[in-house]
Image (cartoon, helix red, strand yellow):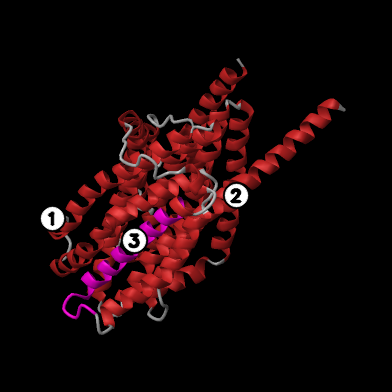
Amino acid sequence: MPRNAAASGAIWQLIAEVGETAKIAFPIVAIQLGQAAMTMTDMLLIGGISIDALAAVAVAGRVYLTTFAIALGVLAPIAPVVAQACAAGKLESIRGALRTGLLLALALSLPLIALATHAEQVLLRLGQAPDVARLSQQYLSGLCWGAVPALSFQAIRNVMDAAHRPQPSLWITLAAIPTNALLVYLLIHGRIGFACQPLLGAGLATAVINWTMFLAGVWFITSCRPIRAYRLALHWWLIDWMLMWRLIAVGAPISLTSALTYGAYSVAGLLAGAIGSNAAAAHQISLQVASIAALMSFGISMATAVRVAEAVGRHDGHGMRRASLAAMLLAIVCSATLAVCVVATRFKIAHYFLHSGAPEIDLAINLAADLLLVSVCGLIPTAVHNVAAGSLRGLQDTRMIPLYAGIAYWLIGVIISYVLGLKLRLGVIGIWTGLLIGTVIYAILLVSRAQVLVCRMFRECDD
């Protein structure tokens, strides 16, 4: 009986942990999707101007979001640092993490702004059409002035997420989506519009919204309960340089991992483009679906980092194990559900991107639907490696993550994609099969690393 009672208690604790993780994760996922919706809104509104304008925003958005994601890697350790401090009751460490995070956000935004202001030359050297490069420069020239507040808002978000208060960030993001759409429309088509450079107006509109979101975030953390009890603005001028180097040491490998992952999928896109337009279109559709799934599992990963870090702060070995397992179960269930939905609606998804009519479009739709069957096989492995990476961030051990990404995606995945796709002539299906193999290997490597470290810290806590 005692053994049965202990097992039953462990199950209920695991269920409760799943619920706590979900409370943090789902608002974060909604925020991630909301920010993607702002970019999509820009594309939909600008698409009415011209095809070149739409292509320019797509290219500019890819450049901006890739560099933005790399910068976010350095800010990601803020959440586990704050979570550990909250669990240990160290308020000054929480304040120090926010101050340091905001300074890092300012520093990281400078190269992003520099790249955006010279985007036309970069894109021309990468082989983009002159008109697309010129219009991309217009959009980025306005958008780049929102880099400082956008990254600063992410630093504030990390603090609020770690304090189990992700809802204010969600409210701010939800309010920003329609406001951004209205302002973009007015600056493109309204009387206050930029008639000669509408893409500049669209970029400036989103930059203004980023500043508004940042200021709203500052108001929440300084004025609203219970966050204001932390007095986060106290001694705002003090910088903890040791903490800054600690954040960089943990965050830089995350940024490098993002660059390696984005790079692998970019190479896959080039391989698909070398096969033909149908393959390139199918690749883009599958990439969009995979990106949405990755946003979902990355939100759960951020919650995992918080829950594991809290257990570390309490010196709770059982809590570390439970947090990792609960997040893994939640991510697998959500990804499996999404995979079933994609399989059931794969032709509708393809039709959404490619309007049927001409025979060649029908061929592209069928190819995209077939490719979605391959890409959904990677949803669960992606969720698994994201959650494992979240556990490692919570343990503040990230140095091996980029090495694993390089091995899995570049030494294995990209090479297999090239061989299957081009040499064995399996086309875009072969390319994504290579990516799938790389994703599975990456998940195995990260889970193994996380398991070893959690078990090691479990023994240390028991001792």
The residue that disc 1 covers is: 125
The residue at the point 78 percent across, 29 percent down is 6
Cα separation, mark 3 vs mark 2, equals 27 Å
Marks 1 & 3, CB-CB < 8 Å contact: no
**Magenta segment, which residues?**
193-221
The x, y position of residue 172, in whole percent, is 45, 61
Q: Secondary structure at mark 2?
A: helix
The residue at the point 26 percent across, 76 percent down is 51
The residue that disc 3 covers is: 210
Q: Secondary structure at mark 1?
A: helix
Nearer to the camera, 130 or 216: 216
Give the residue type at disc 1: Arg
Looking at the image, residue 65 sits to the left or right of residue 307; the answer is left
Q: Residues within 10 Å of mark 3 (few under 14, many from 20)?
A: many
The residue at the point 24 percent across, 59 percent down is 145
Magenta stretch, main secondary structure, is helix
The quarter of the displayed image where residue 260 is located: top left
* 175 in relation to 326, above or below: below
The residue that disc 2 covers is: 22
Give the residue type at disc 2: Ala
The quarter of the displayed image where residue 179 is located: bottom left
The x, y position of residue 84, in whole percent, is 50, 33
- N-term-proximal mark, 2 vs 1: 2
Quarter of the image that includes the C terminus: top right
Looking at the image, residue 153 sits to the left or right of residue 27; the answer is left
Q: Residues within 10 Å of mark 2 (few under 14, many from 20)?
A: many
